[in-house]
């Protein structure tokens, strides 16, 4: 197939480099020799949700020659799957390419993301970059945003390594909410009950109760090639955590996309409901966070830039990186905590931060510094993000903020030992505050461009306005009988 791919539309537009052409040819040969029946050709949308089409395995070659056309409105949806931009009249307000009339964009497969699905071995995934129909880049596509941030860091002579801790819930599904009255936008949530009681953090007896489910998830994750490190019982009922070995930034963004989708699909097939929602509205529930471990190395020498000479000190790069994460924490929140619900996690004394500060190995601080002389694992951990974040946007925020701290010559303030006290600035308390901070950030407008910033603001304001217009149970209880 190599000649056909080289002569295809994608190659002629310069969208496939030599390494991709060779990898595509090898992949197609493997697929042809396999028993694979279908391939899910997917991209990560603006919310970190996988969307795409399923093609028969023999059609995969056409994805590398001509790409896969997809309705552009998929890039314009809010979390209810409503289109947040005008596409039928006037202009969308986006300048880089045409998005009127629900026209097509093009998916360009990334061979390294191809995975046969352990829980559905007749099928496979392949992730894609998204471009306009003429091959020009879409500046606000998720993989593009992260790729640009990685390139900016590389231009400064550095590379980052990321480690992940991901918390989530798995419940028994009591009622799947499939009556016609439940098929709304968004759909009625299912009724659930816990798999196990909670508040027994890391207890082996609770692990034993749910081991069959966790074994299925671990095996599926390992079958996808994900670098699973540990499987843990978290604090709350039916709350679990997977941690992953360090990896390059783009690899872990792809890995987290795969992990979240796998968990939901494997659980659904077993009559379970998995959710990465930050704080579900259920009795006795604990909030879920996503802790992002991050370290830096010099591109030329490979040397770590975060190993201190003396205990209790910071290298200049670590100090600048921490200072950047703190300085831009409020503006970054739209990318790391993108939902209305996420801001209800920022409560004191709950192993989640509520102030913008850092501490030496302090789990209550937003930034936890884990650094020691001669320790190659020296790193910082950002505990502010949550598991609903689009991983490409959230990791881009780490690189953009940290790099600015270094290049601007910022230094970290003194560490805190009392993370829930003092005069430190509070993290945003609502999505509205995060929207305003992101809108006012000169750094993000410079790093992402006005179009990408305004695109994200439009989607999140559309979502926030829908939230404000909804009548809550609190309002009904507060006022219906009183007045």
Image (cartoon, grey):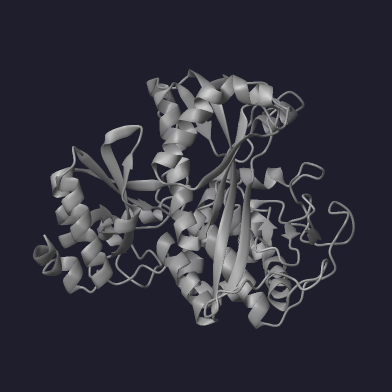
Q: Looking at the rendering, in which quadrant would you find the N terminus?
A: bottom left
Which residue is depicted at the point 18% across and 37% down?
A: 35
Indicate the position of residue 474 as horizontal and vertical percent values: 70, 32
> Who is closer to the viewer here, 456 or 372?
372
**Relative to 101, is 203 on the left or the right?**
right
Q: Looking at the rendering, in which quadrant would you find the C terminus?
A: top right
Placement of 119 over or under 306, stated as above or below: above
Regarding residue 328, the answer to whether it shows in the image is yes
Placement of 18 over or under 340, stated as above or below: below
Which residue is depicted at the point 52% across and 80% down?
A: 300
What residue occupies the far top of the structure in this picture?
A: 174
What residue occupies the far front of the structure in this picture?
A: 374
> Who is closer to the viewer here, 132 or 254?
254
Indicate the position of residue 280 as horizontal and vertical percent values: 62, 33
Instruction: Tell me which corner region of the image, top left, top right, bottom left or bottom right, holds residue 432.
Output: bottom right
Indicate the position of residue 216 as horizontal and vertical percent values: 46, 29
Placement of 120 over or under 454, stated as above or below: above
> Who is closer to the viewer here, 150 or 160?
160
Which residue is depicted at the point 50% across and 53% down?
A: 390
Indicate the position of residue 341 as horizontal and vertical percent values: 62, 43
**Relative to 94, is 200 on the left or the right?**
right
């Amino acid at each position: 197939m190599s000649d056909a791919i080289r002569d295809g539309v994608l190659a002629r537009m310069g969208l496939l480099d030599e390494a991709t052409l060779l990898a595509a040819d090898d992949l197609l040969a493997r697929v042809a020799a396999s028993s694979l029946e279908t391939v899910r050709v997917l991209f990560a949308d603006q919310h970190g949700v996988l969307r795409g089409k399923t093609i028969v395995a023999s059609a995969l070659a056409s994805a590398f020659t001509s790409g896969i056309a997809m309705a552009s409105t998929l890039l314009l949806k809010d979390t209810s799957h409503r289109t947040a931009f005008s596409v039928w009249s006037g202009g969308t307000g986006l300048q880089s390419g045409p998005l009127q009339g629900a026209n097509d964009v093009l998916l360009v497969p990334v061979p390294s993301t191809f995975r046969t699905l352990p829980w559905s071995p007749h099928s496979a995934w392949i992730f894609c970059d998204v471009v306009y129909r003429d091959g020009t880049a879409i500046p606000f596509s998720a993989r593009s945003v992260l790729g640009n941030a990685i390139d900016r860091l590389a231009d400064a002579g550095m590379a980052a390594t990321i480690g992940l801790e991901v918390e989530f819930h798995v419940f028994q599904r009591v009622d799947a909410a499939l009556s016609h009255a439940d098929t709304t936008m968004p759909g009625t949530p299912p009724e659930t009950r816990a798999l196990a009681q909670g508040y027994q953090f890391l207890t082996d007896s609770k692990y034993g109760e749910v081991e069959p489910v966790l074994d299925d998830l671990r095996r599926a994750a390992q079958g996808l090639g994900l670098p699973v490190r540990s499987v843990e019982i978290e604090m709350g009922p039916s709350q679990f955590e997977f941690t992953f070995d360090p990896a390059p930034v783009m690899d872990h963004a792809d890995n987290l996309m795969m992990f979240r989708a796998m968990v939901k699909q494997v659980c659904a097939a077993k009559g379970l409901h998995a959710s990465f929602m930050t704080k579900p509205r259920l009795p006795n529930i604990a909030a879920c966070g996503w802790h992002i471990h991050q370290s830096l190395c010099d591109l030329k020498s490979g040397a770590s830039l975060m190993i201190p000479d003396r205990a209790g000190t910071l290298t200049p790069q670590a100090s600048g990186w921490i200072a950047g994460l703190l300085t831009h924490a409020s503006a970054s929140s739209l990318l790391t905590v993108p939902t209305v619900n996420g801001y209800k996690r920022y409560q004191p004394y709950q192993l989640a931060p509520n102030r913008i500060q850092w501490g030496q190995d302090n789990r209550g601080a937003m930034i936890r510094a884990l650094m020691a002389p001669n320790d190659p694992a020296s790193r910082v951990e950002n505990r502010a993000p949550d598991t609903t974040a689009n991983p490409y946007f959230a990791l881009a925020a780490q690189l953009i903020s940290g790099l600015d701290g270094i290049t601007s010559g910022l230094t970290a303030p003194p560490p805190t030992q009392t993370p829930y006290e003092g005069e430190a600035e509070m993290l945003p308390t609502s999505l509205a505050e995060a929207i305003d901070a992101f809108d006012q950030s000169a750094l993000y407008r410079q790093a992402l461009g006005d179009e990408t910033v305004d695109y994200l603001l439009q989607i999140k304001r559309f979502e926030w306005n829908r939230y404000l217009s909804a009548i809550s149970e609190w309002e009904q209880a507060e006022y219906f009988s009183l007045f």
